Image (spheres, rainbow, N blue to C red):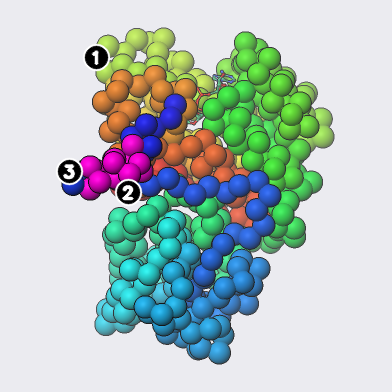
Amino acid sequence: MSDRYIEFANSSIGHRLVGALGLPSPVRLERWQAGRLRPIEGALLIGGGPLAEKVGAFANRLTDAIYSYGTDPSMATAWIPGHGPKLKAVVFDASDLIQTDQLKQLREFFQPLMKNLDHGAHLVILGRAPQSLSDPFAASAQRALEGFSRSLAKEMRGGGTLQLIQVGDGAEDQLEGPLRFFLSPKSAFVSGQVVRLDACNTQVTDWTRPLSGRKALVTGAARGIGASIAETLARDGADVILLDVPTAKTDLEALAARLGGRGITLDICAEDAAAQLIEQLPDGIDIVVHNAGITRDKTLANMTPEFWDAVLAVNLNAPQVLTKALLDSGTLQDDGRVILLASISGIAGNRGQTNYAASKAGLIGLAQAWAPLLKARGISINAVAPGFIETQMTAHLPFGLREAGRRMSSLGQGGLPQDVAEAVAWLAQPGTGAFTGQALRVCGQSVLGA
Ligand SMILES: NC(=O)c1ccc[n+]([C@@H]2O[C@H](COP(=O)([O-])OP(=O)(O)OC[C@H]3O[C@@H](n4cnc5c(N)ncnc54)[C@H](O)[C@@H]3O)[C@@H](O)[C@H]2O)c1
C-alpha cells in the first residue's frame, strides 16, 4: 500500500504546509537499485582512532571520494568543514575512547559534519562491547557511545541513518561486509542500532554475488516480505527454494520460475512438515529464512484458543521444529545461516497482539539461546525485527493504527519489504557468521520498544 502522505509532504505545496504546521516531513528514502556496484555514491569521511586506518585500507572499494578529518591527513584528502563536499557516508572509530573526558571527541568530530551531510547520509560509529572491557571506566565510556549514537540518529535529517558497531577482538579486519551494508542504501530503513561484530572464519570473495554457491530456503515466500527476500537472495547469487502453503501455489511457482529457483508447497505446521522438507532438500541447505508468519489480533479478554494456537504454531513452533530437524538430519550445513523473522511487537509489546508478540519475542529468545550452541559448526542464528513495513499484512490495519505505525519513527514512514530483505541478505553472507544471537531491528528507529 502506498504512503500518500509522503507524496504530499514532498510536493511543493505539501512541503510548505507541512513545514508551517510543524507536521512530520518524511523524505523519500534512497534504495539500492539493481546493477549498482558501489555501496557509496558520494563522499566518505573517515576519522577517529586506530580502526580508521583499517577502514581506509578498503575504502577505495566503497567509493572514489575518500576524505579524512581529524586523523592522519596522509590517509586521504583532508575534509574542511564548509569547504569539503557534502558527505554521503561517515565512519568514526571511537573504540579507543576509554575515559569520560575523551568522549568530547564525539562532539568535536560530529558537530562540524551535521550541517554538511548529503541527502540519505549513512553514519557508523565503531566501538567495543562494554561487557568485553574489564576497566569499569572504559566500559562506561563505551556504553556512553550507545546513548550518543541513538540520540544522534534521532537528529539525522534527509533520510539519514546512524549505527554503532561494537567490534570484537579479531573482527578488526572484517569491517568491509558490515560497512557495505550500513553505509549503503541497503540499510535505508535501519537506524539507531547497536550491533556486535565478532571474528568469523569465512569471508565473502565476490562482492557482486556474495551468496554465490549457497542454497537458501525461504518460508512464506509467495508474497510480501518473503517474496522480496527470495528475490534479494537470488540477486546476490543464491540458489533459492521458495516455500508456501498449497493455496499459494500459483504465485509461488511463478516467482520461483522467474528467479530460476524451485517452489515447495507445504504447510509448515503439518505433522509431517519436517520429514517432507528434509525429503525435498536432498542436497542440503546453507541458508534458512523462517519468514512465514500470521497475525490473529484480539485483546486477551477476547482471545480465542484457536487464534492463540494458530499464531504460536506458525510463528514459533514451526521454526523451532523445522530448524531442529534440519540440524539433526545434517540437512543444514556447516557455516549455515538461520534467520528468524521477528517483529518490534516482540520487543515493545502491542495491544491486541499478546499471541503475536509472545511468538516473536520467543524467536528472539531462540536466536539468543541457540547461537552459542551452533557456533562450533560456524552456524549463525539471528532474528530480524521489522517495524512497520508496507505489505498486505499492514494494509489491513485500521487507518489510525497504520498512520501511527508509519510516523512513530525517526524516519517518519513505513519501510518496504526490500528493506527487510536487504538485512536478511546481509545476515546470510559468509562474513557475517560471527554476528549471531542478535536481533537486528529494521524499523526506521521506531519509538516502540526503543
Ligand atoms: N508487514 C510488517 O509490517 C511486518 C512487521 C513485523 C514483522 N513481520 C513479519 O514478517 C513476516 C512476513 O510478513 P508479511 O507482511 O510479508 O506477511 P504476509 O501475510 O504478506 O505473508 C506471509 C506469508 O506466509 C505464508 N504462510 C502463512 N502461514 C503459513 C504456513 N502455515 N505454512 C507456510 N506458509 C505460510 C503465507 O501464505 C504468506 O505467503 C511475518 O513473519 C511477519 O510476522 C511483518
User: Which residue carries the number 3 mark?
Assistant: 21
> Residue 104 lies in what quarter of the image?
bottom left
Comes first in the chain, label 3 or label 1: 3
Q: Position of residue 88 (x, y in %)?
A: 48, 64
Label 3, label 2: how many angstroms apart (C-alpha)? 18 Å
Secondary structure at badge 1 equals: helix
Task: Tell me which amino acid carries mark 1.
Answer: Ala
C-alpha span from label 3 to label 1: 40 Å
| Residue 410: numbered disc | 2
Marker disc for residue 301: 1
The reply, left or right, for residue 287 in relation to residue 100 is right
> Which residue is the extreme one toward the front?
13
**Mark 3 crowd level (few <14, some 14–19, many ≥20, 10 Å Cα):** few
3 or 2: mark nearer the eye: 3
State the image quarter where residue 48 is shown: bottom left
The secondary element bearing badge 2 is classed as loop
Task: Name the spot of residue 96 as percent of width and height, x first.
Answer: 42, 79
Determine if residue 51 is in view.
yes
Magenta part of the chain? 8-19
Q: Earlier in the sequence, mark 3 or mark 2?
A: 3
Residue type, mark 3 in image? Leu
Residue at point 41% right, 74% down? Answer: 94
On whether ligand 1 comes within 8 Å of the CB at mark 3, the answer is no
Residue 250's place in the image compared with 193, above or below, is above
